Image (cartoon, rainbow, N blue to C red):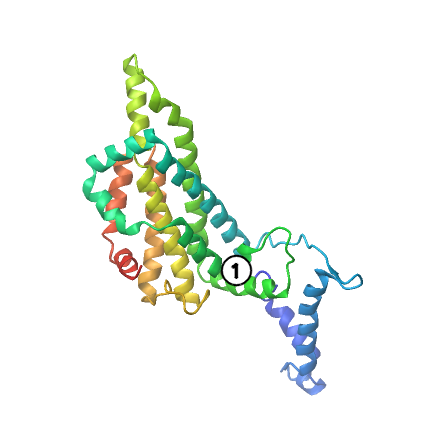
Amino acid sequence: AVCHGIWDVELVKELEGLGATSKESTDNARKSEPLLVDAAFALVSCLDLITSNLSSGKTRISNYRPVYTYTAMATRSLDRFLRDLVELDALVSENSSIADCIKTMELQQPKLCGDLRPLKIDSKALKEMAYDIFPTMVKGDDENWIDEDTFSEHQTNLALASNIVVLTLLADASDAIKKYLDGVQKRIDVLSMHPSSTKDRRILKTTTRFCSAAMIVRDFYTFTVYVALVTMKDRNDVGSPNDATKKKFNREDIVRASERSRMTLSTFDSHIANNLDRSLKALQQYLQGKAVKKVLLAK
C-alpha cells in the first residue's frame, strides 16, 4: 500500500481499531495510539532489514524494484525517452544526410522553425530535472532499495495519482520518439540512393520529407516531457525546493498545457509519416496556445 501511494481505507480502519478502547470500539470511534505508531515504524524498519545482512555485517544486494507503481511506470518511460533522445541527437548532429534534410525543412518552414527554438531543451538539463523529481531513477542495479526509497516513491506515487495526464504524457512521448527514431533508421539508407525511376524518386522525396522533421520532433517531443515534469513540480511540490525550474503557474494553465501537449503529440505522431503538413499545422496551433506560451515564458 505504501509503494502504490494509496492506503486501503478499510485496512487503516482495522489497524486503528486495534488501538481503540472497548468503549471507543463500541461507539465505532477508532483512534490510533502510540503503539500503532511504533508498529508502523517497525514495518518500515523491516524494509531496511530486508536489504541488509546484519549477521555478516555486510550489505546484501537487493534485487527488489517496484514494477507496477505509478512511479515505476513513469521512470521507465523517462528512461526510454532519454535513451532514445541521445540517439536522435547523435543522428541530427553527426549524420550529414539528416542534416541536409533538416536544412530543407528550415527553408520551407522558416517561421515554424523559428517559433520552435524557444522549446529547445538540453538533454542533460532534462535528465537532471527528471532525477530531481524521481530520485530513485539514480539508483543503480547494484544498489540496495531501502526505506528512504520507499518513502520517496510514496511521495511521487501520490503526485502521479493526482496527475494521471503526466503519466500518460510521459508514456506517449516515449513511444512517439521511439517510433520516429525507428522510422528514420529504417529509411536512412534511402537518402543516399540515386533514383533511376519515378517510383524511386517518389520514395526518396517521401523519405527526405520524413527525415527533415528530425529537429522539430526532437525539440517538440522534449518539450512535452518538460511540460509533464513542470506539472509534477508545480502542483505537487516534489523535487528540490530551490530548483530554478520550479515555477508557480495558475493551476488551470498548467493542466491545460499538459492536456494540450498530449493531444498535439498524438496528432503529430499519428500523421508525421503520411501527412506531415497536418502534423506541422497541429504544432503551429499548439505554439499559439496561451497556456503553452506561459510555460515558455517561465522556462
Is residue 228 in view? yes
- Around disc 1, counting alpha carbons within 10 Å, would you say few (fewer than 14), some (14 to 19), or many (20 or more)? some
Give the x, y percent position of residue 217. 34, 41
Give the quarter of the figure containing the C terminus: bottom left
Give the x, y percent position of residue 160. 48, 60
Q: Is residue 17 above or below residue 280?
A: below
Q: How many marks?
A: 1
Give the quarter of the figure containing the N terminus: bottom right
Give the x, y percent position of residue 237. 44, 68
Side (left or right) of 162 relative to 265: right
Instruction: Locate residue 64: give its quadrant.
Output: bottom right
- The amino acid sitting under disc 1 is Pro
Work out whether residue 126 or residue 276 is closer to the camera in this orientation and state it.
126
Side (left or right) of 260 relative to 2: left
Work out whether residue 50 or residue 141 is closer to the camera in this orientation and state it.
141
In the rendered image, the residue lying farthest to the right is 55
Q: Is residue 80 above or below residue 16?
A: above
Give the x, y percent position of residue 189. 39, 23
Q: Is residue 85 above or below residue 103?
A: below
**Residue for point 34% across, 19% down:** 193
**Residue for point 39% across, 35% down:** 91
In the rendered image, the residue lying farthest to the top is 196
Is residue 5 in view? no
Q: Is residue 4 above or below residue 101?
A: below
Side (left or right) of 51 relative to 153: right
Name the residue carrying label 1.
Answer: 135
Instruction: Locate residue 110: give its quadrant.
Output: top left
Instruction: Locate residue 271: give its quadrant.
Output: top left
**Residue for point 67% across, 73% down:** 41
